[in-house]
Each structure stands twice: as structure tokens, then as C-alpha cells.
Amino acid sequence: MALQSLDIIRRSATTIPAPAARGAHSGEVAKLIDVTKCIGCKACQVACMEWNDLRDEVGTCSGSYDNPADLSDQTWTLMRFSEHENAKGDLEWLIRKDGCMHCADPGCLKACPAPGAIVQYANGIVDFHEENCIGCGYCITGCPFNVPRISKKDKKAYKCTLCSDRVGVGLEPACVKTCPTGAIVFGSKDDMKQHAAERIEDLKSRGFDNAGLYDPQGVGGTHVMYVLHHADQAGLYAGLPQDPHISAMVGLWKGIAKPLALFAIIATALGGFLHYIGIGPNEVSEEDEAAARRELEKTS
Amino acid sequence: MSAVKRDEILRYPAATRINHWIVAISFVLLALSGLAMFYPALFWLSDLFGGGALNRAIHPWIGLVMALALFLLAVKVGRENAMQERDWAWIRKSGEVVANREENVPEAGRYNGGQKLIFWFMATCVALLLLSGLVIWRAYFTAYFPIGVTRMASLVHAFFAFVLICAAIIHVYAGIWVKGSVRAMTRGTVSHGWAWKHHRAWFREMTRGAPRE
């Protein structure tokens, strides 16, 4: 759910051009999650619940510290705990705050058939407008990160808004505000990249040679980025895709299939029309009726 | 069928006609609600079904109705639609049929080769639409499939929906073009001349002394 104070640059299932006069002259925003600084306290999960008035069910232990076990309509962000044994035989506890990545090229928005149910603001935030959502779940089909969830309560899709309602009035997202270690920071995308570069330099000096920024270009970059100790093995972090992109299936389905199908239908209908005009109807003549009568007389 | 007049032949009994129109009406509803979810410019079609969410919710149920009705129809007429040698001969001459020059076209039975092929073609489309449709039925089934299967099913569903829509356009046009056909499905009967012209082997079978069966 979103305020309308931000400029919408993309709107799902909408053929008219998006308003383009205003821009985000202060730059796109980004949330930077420094996985190497995260202690897994889940304060961000609580802050998200508080600000967005969400209450998930108290689940059961699934054998890890993940709680709840998965994202849901009530859990828009979730600490995912992975145990990794590195080459030296040491245990590394990798804790990734999962949630919407706010892609520059959002698969959910591309797949959505409901006009205005998903929007992208000039500042880069991808937001769901649930009042326009029809509950088809195409956003889940389109998402390369498996983030949106359909609510069992109202059959509508929900996910992290990057606190668009807070950002719209100059505040930082709730999870950023509450993070006790400074693992989550928020600002312009350029500033966040610069901050990440400093962190990565520091990590490299401590022996994490493959430390790096996760800002996947396959989806045009994201407005939620990670600093990873093992940027070359994103999959270690609870299956974070190394090189995410919108699936080719979704690309075909929402791309070339549309004009091709329209062309085929129009061509078929037009073919029939021209055939009728050119060749004329296939009518039963008096001769046919007479021939049928002769045949009947012959047999009876 | 007491309504059959002296110079007419019963082509479709009432049960078959009703079955056909259940398929036809549900097809139209499915095409309209499906197009609404495929083309943003046609999203307004969902208003015919009470808005986007209702459109999304009702589409798969209508799909089940169509699949079931088509299955029943296939049970009824499937055997009569088995391709035979003369049907392939008919297909080879179908260019002349389309050109309205039917002198050299082999005699057709109850169904001609074109009708048979389009019947099986449509039945195959509906079967694939049913399977892919179940996969993308988010409320009940999608959670049981991996995301790759769901993505492929979305594409397959759209593809065969359009193939089926094109086939239906051809089917409907054939009915309009070949005069005297529509009433076979609305009233059940065709004239002797119609049967003689379009389904001569069937005409002979139907009129040769004792009635069939």
C-alpha cells in the first residue's frame, strides 16, 4: 500500500505512458544490508511488524533459527540463517535478511495483469497497490527472488514496500531505523554503493577475498543490496540467486506472445471475412436437393 | 425426435446439441475472461464478470465446466471422428473445398476430414489447457509445483488458448460459410440436399432402407 506522494514511473498492465515529467533528481534510493554485520537479532522483523501492523502466527521450530519459517502476507522481511563450513573447516553463520529486492526491472510488475496493482516509483521503490490486486499470483510467477505472497485472508499479494510511506515523507524504512548494529543503512543508491565499497575494502583486508556487493545486473540492479563475504557464492545465503533475471518463459509470455497472438487472431478472423467476400457462401442448390431425392427414390 | 420433417435428417439429438452449447458458451466466457487477464488493453472485459478479482476467481471454474462438457462430447462423438483413409483423401482435396469447387472431393461420412482434425485439435488444446490451468490455479494447486513448471504452464496456457481461439474462429466461420449447418446445432436437423452435398456417404447410410441401429 502506498502513498501517492512519490512519482510513479511504471504501472502494471498499463498501456498509456507513465507520467514522465517529474524525476527523482536526488537520485534513486537504496537499502544496503551488510550481511557481514548482521547478528540475527530480528529487530528488523519486529520493526516491520510494528510499522506495517502485521502479526504472523507464532509458528513451530523448523530446525533452524528462521522464524517464521517463510515469508508470508504477514512477514515481509525474514532473517534466513545458513550454516556454512568454510575451506578452513570453520563454521560461518550466514544470516541474510530476505525480502523484496525492489528490482530496477521488476518481474512481478512485468507479469501483473491488473492495471496499477504494482507500481514503480522514480526513486526505485516497487510497491503493490492491493486495492487493484486481483489475486492471480502472476507476480509470484514473475519474481526471480520468490518474494510476493498471496494472503489467505483476502487473496491479495503482499510484500515489503521499502516503507514507501515513510520514505515518501523523508524517513528511513522501519528496519533501517531499528537495526542495532548498523547492518542496514538507507540512502541514495550512489551513496549506498560508495558505503558498500568501503565495507568491501575492509572485509578484503580481513581475509574475505571474495567480499562484494550484490546488486544483480540481470534485473537491472536492485534497490535493496547486500554486502556479502562470499559474493562469488550467493547461493550460500539461503539460496540467493547468483545471477537473477526475469525467466525467459515469463519474458515470452509477457512479451512477444501478446502481439503474435493478437496477430494470429486478427489474421484468422480477417481470413474468414475475406474468404466469404471473395469466394462467397457454400449453399445447397436446388440440384443438390433434386440429386438427394433421386438417390432416395433409387434406394427405397 | 418428432420434429424431424419428411425431407430432413436428424444430425444432432437434443442431448448433443445442449452439450455442444455448454462447451460453446463456456468457451466464450473463458475467452473473454482469459483475454482480460492476458491483454492489459482488454482488462475492462473483466467488468463483465464483476471485476478483476471475480474474473480471476471464476475463470478456472468455467474451465472445469468446459473441460468436463467437452469430455462428455468426446465420449459421444469421439469414435465417429476417427480418421479414415477417405478422410485423408478429403484433406488432400481440401483446397478445392475452400475454393467452393467440390466436384472432385471424395465423399465424406458423418464428419469430413477437416471436421475430424479440428475436433481432435480442439480436444488436445482443451486437455493441455486443463493441465496447465490446474498448475496456475493459484488458490488450490500452484503451491504443489516448482516455479519453473508454473512459469512454463503460464506460457503453455496462453499459447494453447490462442491456438484454440483461432481454431474456434475457423470452426464458427465454417458454420457460417456452409449454409444450413448452424441449424444442425440449433434445431438438430439438416435438409436432404445439405446431407447429400456435404456428407454424401453419411446421407446414403442414413437413408438406405432401415434406419441405423
Image (cartoon, coloured by chain):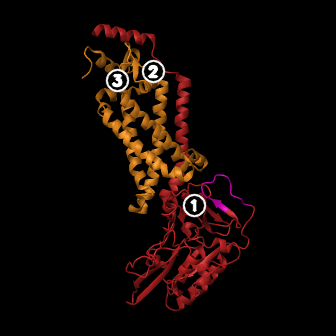
Chain colours: A red, B orange
**Can you say which quadrant of the picture contains the C terminus of chain A?**
top left
Give left or right: position of B95 versus A218. left
Residue labelled with disc 2: B180
CB under 8 Å between discs 2 and 1 = no
Question: Is there one chain holding both mark 1 and mark 3?
Answer: no
| Residues tagged 1 and 3 counted as in contact (Cβ below 8 A) | no
Disc on the earlier residue, 2 or 3: 3
Single out the residue that lies furthest toward the bottom. A206
Tell whether label 3 touches label 2 (CB within 8 Å): no
**Image vertical order of residue A177 relative to residue A221, above or below:** below
Residue at label 1? A109
Q: Circle 3 is placed at which residue position? A: B108
SS for dot 2: loop
Of circles 2 and 1, which is in front?
2
| Residue B117 left/right relative to A43 | left
* Disc 3 residue crowd, few under 14, some 14–19, many 20+, Cα 10 Å: many
Q: Is residue A17 magenta?
A: yes
Give the structural element (helix, strand or loop) at label 3: loop
Type of amino acid under label 2: Gly
Tell me the quarter of the image containing the N terminus of chain A.
bottom right
* Secondary structure character of the magenta stretch overall: loop
Q: What kind of element bears circle 1?
A: helix
- The magenta span reads A9-20
Residue A251 location (% of width, % of height)? 52, 57
Tags 2 and 3 both on a single chain: yes
Residue in the foreground of this view, choosing between A123 and B107: A123
Residue pictured at 68% horizontal, 57% vertical: A18
Q: Chain of mark 2?
A: B
